[in-house]
Amino acid sequence: SGCVQNTQQTEKEPIKIGAVLPITGAASNLGEWAQQGLELAKDEEKFEYNLQDDQCAGQAAVNAFNNLQLSQVKFTTGPICNAASIPVSKIAEDEEIIMITLGVSTKAIREAGNYSFTILPAIEAQTKKLAEYINSQAIKSVSVLYVQDEYGVENKDTFVEAFSQYGTVTNTEAFERSNNDFRAILTKIKVDPSSAVLVIGYSPNYINIINQAKEEAK
């Protein structure tokens, strides 16, 4: 007599995670890239994700995160934007849901608590390296254009501090994330003695500033 051992393995159920990303709005291109990364990884890692659109905005992100809780997920990737990540991190802490942000590393996110994580180094580490690189290019004066939110201000402040040992930040100009017309700012820095311009913002901001700077240069 003997016994037959069943060697057939039961396939594990895929892990279910949440994804809070800017599918629409000012940072939709970033959300699209993140979603492409999830698609590439999910077959290898055997997971499913519930995608919610945060529009790179606070209340929309809270609504998106609350929708995920209906699916009882315990792991969330995103948000990307600082404006979305900070309010969501408060809920993540209260509900003990692990949140891994993809695009911000502000102090507020790094110190949000035990359940909020970021994949990026601290902003001051990034701006320090940027200041070192600009100095290596023999650039001694810089104008800084920055988006008027926590992300933009922290980047601006840490860069100004880091670059002060190499040269001079001759001008700092803030703009709203929704701003589409930068001609007044560009005219102001056109007479500035800066040999370089640092822009801190979101994709539409960069595109508009570059295109309008080209127009101003004609």
Image: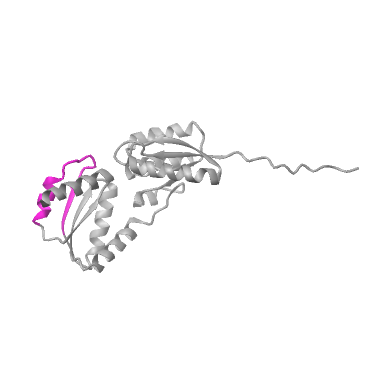
What percent of the width, then of the height, locates residue 18? 47, 38
Taking 155 as reference, is 79 left or right? Answer: right
Residue at x 50%, y 46% (from the top left corner): 41
Q: Residue furthest right?
A: 1
Q: Does the magenta stretch include residue 122?
A: no
Between 168 and 91, the residue placed more toward the observer is 168
Residue at x 49%, y 31% (from the top left corner): 70
Question: Which quadrant of the structure image shows residue 64?
Answer: top left
Residue at x 29%, y 61% (from the top left corner): 130
Taking 122 as reference, is 205 left or right? Answer: left
What percent of the width, then of the height, locates residue 200? 25, 51
Between 90 and 217, the residue placed more toward the observer is 217
Q: Is residue 177 magenta?
A: yes
The image quadrant where one finds the N terminus is top right
Residue 98 visible? The answer is no
What range of the chain is rendered magenta? Answer: 170-191
What percent of the width, then of the height, locates residue 176? 21, 42
What percent of the width, then of the height, locates residue 87? 36, 40
Residue 195 visible? The answer is yes
Between 30 and 98, the residue placed more toward the observer is 30
